[in-house]
Image (tube, rainbow, N blue to C red):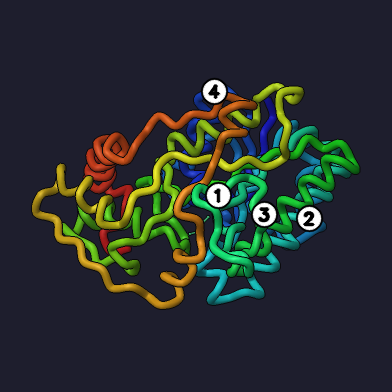
Amino acid sequence: MRILITGAGGQIGHDLIGALVAEGHELVSTDLAPRPPSHAHAGGDWQRLDVTDAAAVQHLFTECRPELVFHLAAILSASGEANPRLAYDVNQTGTWNVLEACRRARVNRLMFTSSIAVFGPPPSGPLPDPAPDDSPLHPGTMYGVTKVAGELLCAYYRKRYDIDCRGVRFPGLISAAMPGGGSSDYALFMYVDGVRKNGYEAFARADTRIPLMYMPDGVRALLELAMADRSKLTRTIYNIAAFSPRADEIATSVGRLLPDAKFTYKPDTIRQGILDSWPKAIDDAAARRDWGWKERFDLDGMTDDLVPRIRRMLELGAILSSH
Ligand code: SER
C-alpha cells in the first residue's frame, strides 16, 4: 500500500517506519526536518514537509496520492505550554491542512494520533477512573485542546466527506527513541538515564500515576486499527490502554535489572500539574470489542525488553549520551 507519514521524525515515526517498511509498504515519510534524524528512521522516501504550510501539504499529497496517511506531526503537551501559539499552528491548523489535502487528493484513509491529554478534570467533579471513551472532555493544555478539535474534525470529515478517519488516544508512550517535550517523558527517562547515567531525577512525584504503553504495542495498535474492517468500527477515535504504574513502581521495575540505579523525585510545577489533570487509567473496552485490541507488554515485560535494547543503542551510539 502507498502510505504517507507526517511528523515521521518523532518518537512514534522512529518505530512506525520500520514496521511499515518490514511489511513491504511503499512509504513516503515527511517531517519538518529535511533529513531523517537517525539511521533508524531510514527506509522509503523522506521529504521535508511543514504541516502548517497548506499549499505544501496539498502539493505533496496530490503528487504522492497516498492510500493511507498516518498523521503524527504535533507539538506535545509540555512544549505546547511553553509555546501555545506554535502548538495551535502545528496541531490545529496542521490537522486541518492534512484533512483538507486528504479530501482534495482523494486519500481513502487517515490515521489520527490523539492522546490521554484530551481528558481533564470536569468542573462537576473528578474524572471517572478508568475514564471511558465518551467522558466529557475538559483538556487543560493547548495540546489537549487541539487533540480534542482534531478528533472532532476527523469525525466531521468522515461524516461529511466520507474520508475513513480513524484514531487512537495514546497513553504516554515509552521507547528507546528520544521524545520531544511531553509530560510523560519522566517515565521514558527512568529507562534511558537509568541505563546511561545510573539514575534519574524525575520531574514528577513518586505517586504520579498515568496510563502508559510500550511503543511496540503502540505501533501495533496503529497498524491494527488502520487495517481493521470498516464495518466493525463503531467509533472514529478509540481509547487504548496497557498499564498505569506509579512513578515509583516504574523505578522498582527498572531496579530489578539495574539494582544500583538511583531514582529521585523533584516535581516540576507545570508538568506535574499537567500529569495530575490526566486520567489515572482509561477504559478501552470498545477497542477490545471492535478490532480486538490487546496489549502484549505489561510493566515488567516492557522493562525486560527495553533495558537491553537501550544498552545496545548506547553501544551503537544511536542514543546521544549528552541528550
Ligand atoms: N505523551 C504526550 C505528552 O506527554 C501525551 O500524549 O505530551
Q: Residues within 10 Å of mark 3 (few under 14, many from 20)?
A: many
Per the model, the C-alpha gap separating discs 3 and 1 is 35 Å
Q: Of residues 300 and 190, which is closer to you in this image? A: 300
Mark 2 or 1, nearer chain start: 2
Give residue 48's position: percent from left, percent from top: 64, 53
Q: Of residues 103 and 2, which is closer to you in this image? A: 103
- At x 61%, y 50%, the residue is 114
* Secondary structure beneath label 2: helix
Q: Residues within 10 Å of mark 2 (few under 14, many from 20)?
A: many
Per the model, the C-alpha gap separating discs 4 and 1 is 34 Å
Judged by depth in the image, the label closer to the viewer, 4 or 1, is 1
Mark 3 or 1, nearer chain start: 3
In the displayed structure, 92 sits above or below 101; it is: below
Q: Is mark 1 within 8 Å of ligand 1?
A: no
Q: Residues within 10 Å of mark 4 (few under 14, many from 20)?
A: few
- At x 31%, y 41%, the residue is 299
Outermost residue toward the left in this view = 260
Name the residue carrying label 3: 49
Q: Which mark is residue 97?
A: 2
Q: Residues within 10 Å of mark 1 (few under 14, many from 20)?
A: some
> Is there any visible trace of residue 237 in the rendered image?
yes
Q: Of residues 118 and 259, which is closer to you in this image? A: 118
Per the model, the C-alpha gap separating discs 2 and 1 is 30 Å
Give residue 125's position: percent from left, percent from top: 57, 65
Q: Is mark 4 within 8 Å of ligand 1?
A: no
* Secondary structure beneath label 1: loop
* Secondary structure beneath label 4: loop
Per the model, the C-alpha gap separating discs 2 and 3 is 12 Å
Per the model, the C-alpha gap separating discs 2 and 4 is 28 Å
